[in-house]
Amino acid sequence: MRLQTRLNGLSTPMSAAEAARAEEVAPALGSMPEWNLADLYKAPDASEVAHDIEAAAVLSARMKERYQGKLTQLGRDGAALATAIEEFEQLVEILGKLGSFAGLYYAANQADPERAKFYGDISEKLTAISTDIIFFDLELNQIDEPAMANALKDARLARYKPWIDNVRKEKPYQLEQKLEELFHEKGQTSSAAWTRLFSETMTALRFPIAGEPQPLALDPVLNLLSDPAEEKRKAAAESLATVFKENVRLFTLITNTLTKDKEISDRWRGFKDVADSRHLANRVEAPVVDALVKSVQDSYPKLSHRYYAMKAKWLGKERLAHWDRNAPLPDKPEKIFTWLEAEQIVLGAFAGFAPEMADIAKEFFDKNWIDAPVRSGKAPGAFSASTVPSVHPYVLLNYLGKPRDVMTLAHELGHGVHQMLARPQGALMAPTPLTLAETASVFGEMLTFKALLKEIHDPKERKAFLAGKVEDMLNTVVRQIAFYTFERKVHETRRQGELTPDQLNAIWMEVQSQSLGSAVELKPGYEVFWTYVPHFIHSPFYVYAYAFGDCLVNSLYGLYEEADPGFVAKYFEMLQAGGSKHHSELLAPFGLDASGPEFWHKGLKVIAGMIDELEAMDANV
């Protein structure tokens, strides 16, 4: 059983030193909201938590007793099968609510051992309860096609047809029940254990930096790669390289083990290509992903290669060192936006597109569905947790008032609006495949970017702001496709035997060199930077979804700017569909088709156009 609630983006807690520096900025930002989780549960020890755990266990056991071994026969009766699926959805809702609360409660302060224990205890309970109903998907897929077609004549069951169709796509790759139970339970001591080893090892690593009173954790060191001072960027990159090299044998072992673990699972299930299981989970066909990858790779010269050559000139260099890739522009103005200003900017941008979009987003501000301030121990980064349809999403930020923070707020609220609009689909069909999950977030970010850009008239500030957006898009599209290419090569090569650190390093350098171009010099030490990318460990082949979403939104936004008839109504219908429609169905009303390179090139032209504008600014200086 897959829980349908998403809570992504949790990583190393912010260090006390980082939090202290952030807190110095806080007074200038004004009052910021902290979320109130009472709409889920009032507290970890609230009686409702224990009640729902017990209710889920009872419902799960009852479903096992009532339906196990009987779903195939039940498939002849549409009304009876609808009742079973409704009970299944009810269980998914309860488990999702418990998991969401535990995850959000922990994210608010990951340094608190009591919160960590609560999160771990709830996770174990959810795994145990969900093991009881592994049979459900398996037996649902044993109903033959004529019987299912007849059963779907029942109106209550017909509502679930999109979900049933998605479940039945997995039929060729499912094993018999005892094996599925074994895979499910053994996951905690196989892949999950190695993933935990990676996370805990990376969390414990400390990186000595000259001038810092004590070694730093990973996130603060990565942040230094965007520092205005080159000596700090270089020191951070060299410290990362030194510590990663000291641990490269362990990370190589973890990578080899998890890659082999996936190969075993894929072989037993019958997946042929190394990424087929991810494509199935994303409800996207391999040729569509192949078209995306090839389009991005073909565009490297006019995107990343061209931009980094221009940036090297801005920084007064013949070539950028790898630690200069995300360096800010010289004399970059950095306006600070108060929280109230950020709220007004984002809501104004949303309202300019559709008042309904702004109205939904405003609820997040008015009802404390956002946790914005930086705090020691709080999860870094940002996310929007969909929770469950009976409640509402929650947004986590670490707001510091920078223009990028305003864009992040817009991005996460885009997710929130999407999740709110999809709620009527219910717990089984509201969640969106990863390839479409970034649609509303990136679109909301683009609306806000355009609104901010209109208000910037100083040429230097405009150039820096536009360059920052281009770099974000290159990191989302070019870098993620390079990551995907690296993963493919690693998984394919691993099928021939274990990989050495040198082999992994060589694959990484080859792929990065191709994607970044000759304007970026990959200095000694960069060869081990593959070790810290968590997506390779936690979610193999996840990364192409970022590029998919960004290019898709760029294509959509191009239509919007061209005043495509009825665009707003079609856009809302797409978000309201949640996970109930395939991407081809959702894009058809816009006249878009993701199966060919033309679609992807349309999206990539948006990035190329921004680079054109930057080149024109240089020419006019």
Image: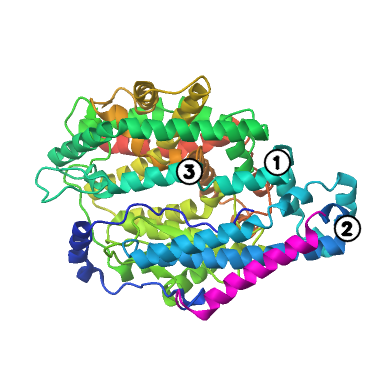
Residue 464 or residue 198, whichever sits in front: 198
| Pointer 2 or 3: first along the chain | 2
C-beta proximity under 8 Å, tags 1 and 3: no
Name the side, left or right, on which 73 lies relative to 376: right
Name the side, left or right, on which 588 lies relative to 212: right
Query: Magenta span has 54?
Result: yes
**Quadrant housing residue 271:** top right
Answer few, some or many: residues within 10 Å of disc 1's Cα (few below 14, many 20 plus, some between 14 and 19): some
Q: Is residue 460 above or below residue 5?
A: above
The spot of residue 468 in percent (x, y) is 31, 45
Instruction: Determine whether the residue tagged by mark 3 lies in a helix, strand or loop.
Output: helix
Question: Disc 1 designates what residue?
Answer: 174
Name the disc covering residue 385, or none: none
Disc 2 from disc 1: Cα separation: 26 Å
Where does the C terminus fall, quadrant-wise?
Answer: top left
Residue 108 or residue 51, whichever sits in front: 51
Q: Amino acid at mark 1?
A: Gln
The spot of residue 64 in percent (x, y) is 74, 60
Disc 1 from disc 3: Cα separation: 28 Å
Answer few, some or many: residues within 10 Å of disc 2's Cα (few below 14, many 20 plus, some between 14 and 19): few
Magenta stretch: dominant secondary structure: helix
Name the side, left or right, on which 166 lies relative to 187: right
Q: Is residue 463 above or below residue 453?
A: above
Q: Which residues are magenta?
A: 43-69
Question: Disc 2 designates what residue?
Answer: 153
| Pointer 2 or 1: first along the chain | 2
